[in-house]
Image (cartoon, rainbow, N blue to C red):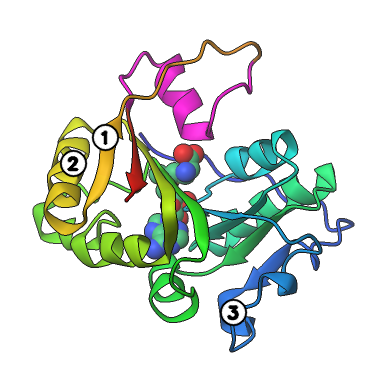
Amino acid sequence: MGRRALRQVDPRIDLSPYLHLAQQLPAAWDSGFFFDQSAPLEIEVGSGKGLFISTEPAARPDRNFLGIEIAAGYAKYAAARIARRGLHNARMISGDAAPIFRERLPSSSIAAVHIYFPDPWWKKRHRKRRIMRPDFLQQIDRVLQPAGRLHFWTDVQEYFEESMQTIAESVRWHGPFPVPIRQPSHDLDYRTHFERRMRLHSHLVYRAEFQKS
Ligand SMILES: C[S@@+](CC[C@H](N)C(=O)[O-])C[C@H]1O[C@@H](n2cnc3c(N)ncnc32)[C@H](O)[C@@H]1O
């Protein structure tokens, strides 16, 4: 399923508090660089148009949320969505999540990682680009606090099954725990835009949650 062109972000919105470029992050990781409040930190990898990163933080103001999005236009779009809501506890990083996990995030520092509908990289020779690969899962394991959680959803059954296998082989987590399916109460009452699209097209969504020991 292709992606539609993004609407332009209103140039009058000041994105500076909400959007940070990966290459301009401070050398030493400091949550205070992003947030005024000290709170457990949750990270979303691949925020896309930013539905999750602009709704979940509004519902859970006592937690901080950081979205990392590699496509600059989407990172900006998601940041604008956060800015319009004036959220104090949600920020975007424009950049690649892999080096940020590998080189920036301290061990045992993150309360939860969210990965929703990661790019499936259909062609066999491109599979190694998938984010649910052993080295990245080991980084998630390293940065999660004890009892920290990974939330992983996809519409691609083969990717889901392969990921369950890779998780079983790469890390020692509890799970997968089943995730209940909620009925939406309005048109944007979905976890992400991709969940919305899949459900409106009656595609199955595979959901799993894991907990670090
Ligand atoms: C299929 S989209 C899903 C977007 C959103 N999670 C949703 O469910 O609507 C996958 C997103 O992950 C982003 N992405 C892919 N690789 C990434 C990486 N290494 N770091 C950060 N974002 C990445 C893509 O640019 C894209 O926006």
The amino acid at mark 3 is: Trp
Q: Residue at x 24, y 62 (%)?
A: 129
Would residue 18 be found to the left or right of residue 70 on screen? right
Tell me if residue 171 comes above or below residue 26 in the rendering. Answer: above
The amino acid at mark 2 is: Met
- Give the mark toward the camera: 1 or 2: 1
- Residue denoted by label 3: 29
Under tag 3, what secondary structure?
Answer: loop
Q: Quick check: marks 3 and 2 in contact, CB under 8 Å?
A: no
Q: Earlier in the sequence, mark 3 or mark 1?
A: 3
Q: Which mark is drawn over residue 164?
A: 2
What separation in Å lies between label 1 and label 2 (alpha carbons)? 8 Å
Under tag 2, what secondary structure?
Answer: helix
Under tag 1, what secondary structure?
Answer: strand
Is 196 inside the magenta-drawn segment?
A: yes
- Residue denoted by label 1: 176
Q: Earlier in the sequence, mark 1 or mark 2?
A: 2
Q: Residue at x 85, y 48 (%)?
A: 86
The amino acid at mark 1 is: Pro
Local crowd size for mark 3, using a 10 Å CA cut-off: few (<14), some (14–19), many (≥20): few
Q: Read off the magenta span.
A: 187-206
Tell me if residue 96 comes above or below residue 160 in the rendering. Answer: below
Q: Quick check: marks 1 and 2 in contact, CB under 8 Å?
A: yes
Image-quadrant location for residue 103 = bottom left
Image-quadrant location for residue 26 = bottom right
